[in-house]
Image (cartoon, rainbow, N blue to C red):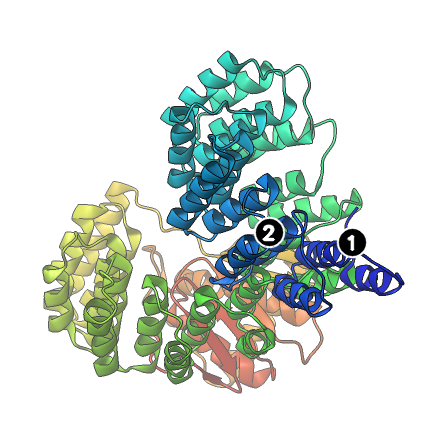
């Protein structure tokens, strides 16, 4: 039975004569279970102030609580009281001390506490104390230490128990140490503890965590009794490997499902980038009357972020409030990311301000959110705030900062941050950091410096980096470097349609029509196909998908009719289609039709038909938005009085009153 802290306090205070040590136990246990670890020490201090002496049963729940708190010195302080009150020989208190030190990363202190117990007892430590050491390291995510402690336990002659095997198998799985896991499996068989459901579940989970699904399946098949944990381990294992359909087949065959199994399946779809199916699974979870938890909601909110499904994300937040699901730092970080990816940076900032606890991922999420939404200066200010609160940035944080410099056009600042990352924070730049620098220099027209930076990279530049520079060459009309980069890019990816489009546009602008024809001929001979444009838009909680020129939507006739009216309205105010990025070799009139039917234009026509006049239109595009669509949407935002937010492959575009946030669009 879980104690509600306020209920526990009320019951405690209502007892006219109570044993103070027991009072501390119940208070500490209640605080711990409610994640109010910071109050455990205060409850203990209150007990001492009443003149009560702790006993052997006081310290285990107290240490369990303080081990989960952020007070690094708390285990040592409690240790002093264990000694003071003569409890060094208590297996309960000593084992709790060992676990507290180990989970807090103080391995030497944990070993010292174990040795102290052995000296006090005059014999070797019991399996219970060793189990505390092994499980403590595992809880602290020091899986290697956990496994080494198991080896030390065997050398000390202590006999492993079922609890030992569960802990060390968990450490092997989470540490991806399959070789040791197999050796532990052999000891499990030789020990005679089988059949034991918890140990067998730990074996299945260990193999699944180590991506050895054949062995996991054999261990599962050998079980005489299985429960939901057994099945969930297999489902999670297949999902982690990207074998989501096989995971779903197992999931559907489960005799019973709990929150963890539903969450494993939802997260599997998220990891496989099948976000719509993840949200569909969440709906089924609700129909099955299974309550979600904070882990479920992180996966759901992540799916909403990727789809740009702001309505669904908002609903998820309401659902959490109604269900009493705690808003921990992970959920808060996911919400910041979701609002940012939906182009609602103000709401992302609101979540950030409301969070009582933040970590480096919180700061990184809001910096990235501000950066990609065009608030470069604010993102840099947020980075400086992060440094002031002594939160150390990591490599992802610097991606956000460099992105902010790119969108704000702060070339010198970008160089400064890049060097600071290397020299001040000792972070080796990866290919993404170099990509940010190339983008920064390219947008600023520093094409030669960008090319030199690519040549000086310690790793081979990928297609993304070269494509970024090629796009910059097109914008700034640097055909010489553009041809060189295009050649290198085609060596990496011969069927990259973007290269042909950009190079063709550059030739056309230079009136090199023979080269344009040569490229178009090469495209036709090689059968290169341009990746189809796809746009997603959320309407009334449902995700609608539009592909360029597609007529599969149930409202297709109305949508194309509305789009025809929109094009007429645009032409009446001076719009003329820009066909320079048309990929196919067709007549001019047909090129215009292809441009008119781009997926984001179809999505906007659908939104104008289906939403209220003051509703913001939010679109997620799989490709970079073409110049014609960009110009057309600017006019649409003015003519129809709508705010339109488009997230394409490279950035956000916020259209209002005929203007766009990306002043340097390319």
Residue 528 placement (x, y as % from top left): 30, 45
Q: Which mark is residue 422?
A: none
Q: Residue at x 38, y 84 (%)?
A: 377
Residue holding disc 2: 64
Nearer-N-terminus badge (1/2): 1
Residue 239 placement (x, y as % from top left): 53, 36
Q: From this viewpoint, is residue 545 visible?
A: no
As drawn, 227 above or below 67? above
Is 527 left, or right, of 146 in this rendering?
Answer: left
Q: Which callout, 1 or 2, points to the residue nearer the camera?
A: 2
Q: From this viewpoint, is residue 219 visible?
A: yes
- Nearer to the camera, 544 or 571: 544
- Nearer to the camera, 604 or 384: 384
As drawn, 154 above or below 122? above
Residue holding disc 1: 3
Residue 458 placement (x, y as % from top left): 14, 56
Residue 451 placement (x, y as % from top left): 13, 66
Element at label 2: helix
Q: Residue at x 60, y 58 (%)?
A: 301
């Amino acid at each position: 039975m879980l104690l509600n802290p306020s209920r526990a306090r009320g019951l405690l205070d209502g007892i006219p004569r109570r044993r103070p040590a027991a009072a501390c136990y119940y208070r500490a246990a209640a605080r711990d279970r409610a994640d109010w670890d910071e109050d455990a020490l205060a409850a203990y201090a209150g007990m001492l102030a009443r003149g009560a002496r702790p006993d052997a049963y006081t310290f285990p729940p107290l240490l369990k609580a303080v081990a989960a708190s952020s007070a690094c010195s708390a285990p040592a302080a409690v240790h002093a009281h264990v000694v003071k009150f003569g409890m060094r020989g208590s297996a309960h208190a000593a084992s709790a001390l060992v676990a507290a030190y180990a989970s807090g990363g103080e391995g030497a202190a944990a070993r010292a506490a174990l040795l102290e117990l052995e000296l006090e007892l005059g014999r070797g430590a019991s399996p219970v104390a060793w189990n505390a050491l092994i499980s403590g390291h595992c809880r602290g995510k020091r899986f290697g230490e956990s496994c080494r402690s198991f080896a030390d336990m065997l050398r000390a002659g202590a006999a492993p128990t079922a609890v030992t095997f569960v802990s060390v198998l968990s450490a092997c799985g989470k540490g991806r140490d399959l070789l040791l896991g197999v050796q532990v499996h052999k000891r499990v068989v030789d020990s005679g503890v089988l059949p034991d459901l918890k140990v067998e579940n730990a074996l299945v989970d260990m193999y699944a965590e180590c991506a050895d699904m054949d062995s996991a399946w054999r261990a599962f098949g050998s079980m005489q009794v299985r429960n939901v944990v057994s099945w969930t381990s297999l489902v999670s294992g297949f999902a982690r490997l990207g074998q989501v359909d096989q995971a779903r087949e197992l999931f559907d065959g489960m005799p019973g499902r709990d929150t963890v199994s539903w969450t494993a399946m939802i997260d599997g779809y998220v990891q496989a980038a099948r976000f719509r199916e993840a949200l569909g699974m969440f709906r089924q979870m609700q129909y099955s009357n299974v309550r979600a938890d904070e882990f479920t909601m992180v996966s759901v909110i992540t799916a909403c972020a990727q789809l740009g499904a702001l309505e669904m994300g908002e609903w998820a937040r309401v659902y959490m409030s109604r269900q009493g699901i705690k808003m921990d730092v992970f959920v808060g970080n996911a919400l910041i990311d979701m609002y940012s990816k939906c182009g609602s940076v103000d709401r992302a900032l609101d979540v950030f301000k409301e969070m009582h606890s933040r970590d480096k991922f919180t700061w990184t999420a809001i910096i990235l959110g501000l950066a990609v939404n065009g608030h470069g200066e604010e993102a840099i200010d947020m980075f400086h705030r992060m440094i002031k609160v002594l939160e150390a940035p990591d490599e992802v944080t610097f991606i956000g900062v460099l992105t902010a410099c790119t969108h704000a056009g702060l070339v010198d600042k970008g160089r400064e941050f890049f060097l600071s990352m290397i020299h001040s924070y000792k972070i080796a730049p990866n290919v993404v950091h170099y990509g940010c620098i190339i983008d920064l220099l390219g947008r600023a027209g520093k094409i030669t410096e960008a090319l030199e930076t690519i040549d000086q990279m310690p790793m081979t530049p990928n297609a993304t980096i070269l494509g970024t520079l090629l796009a910059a060459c097109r914008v700034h009309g640097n055909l010489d470097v553009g041809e060189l980069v295009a050649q290198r890019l085609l060596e990496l990816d011969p069927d990259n349609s973007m290269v042909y489009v950009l190079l063709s546009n550059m030739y056309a602008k230079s009136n090199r029509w023979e080269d344009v024809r040569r490229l178009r001929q090469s495209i036709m001979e090689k059968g290169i196909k341009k990746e189809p444009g796809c746009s997603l838009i959320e309407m009334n909680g449902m995700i609608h998908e539009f592909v360029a020129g597609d007529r599969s939507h149930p409202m297709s006739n109305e949508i194309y009719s509305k789009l025809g009216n929109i094009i007429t309205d645009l032409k009446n105010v001076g719009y003329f289609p820009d066909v320079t990025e048309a990929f196919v070799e067709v007549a001019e009139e047909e090129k215009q039709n292809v441009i008119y039917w781009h997926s984001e234009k179809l999505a906007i026509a659908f939104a104008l038909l289906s939403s209220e006049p003051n509703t913001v239109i939010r679109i997620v595009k799989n490709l970079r938005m073409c110049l014609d669509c960009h110009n057309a949407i600017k006019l649409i935002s003015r003519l129809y009085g709508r705010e339109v937010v488009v997230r394409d492959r490279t950035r956000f575009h916020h259209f209002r009153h005929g203007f766009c946030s990306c002043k340097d669009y390319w």
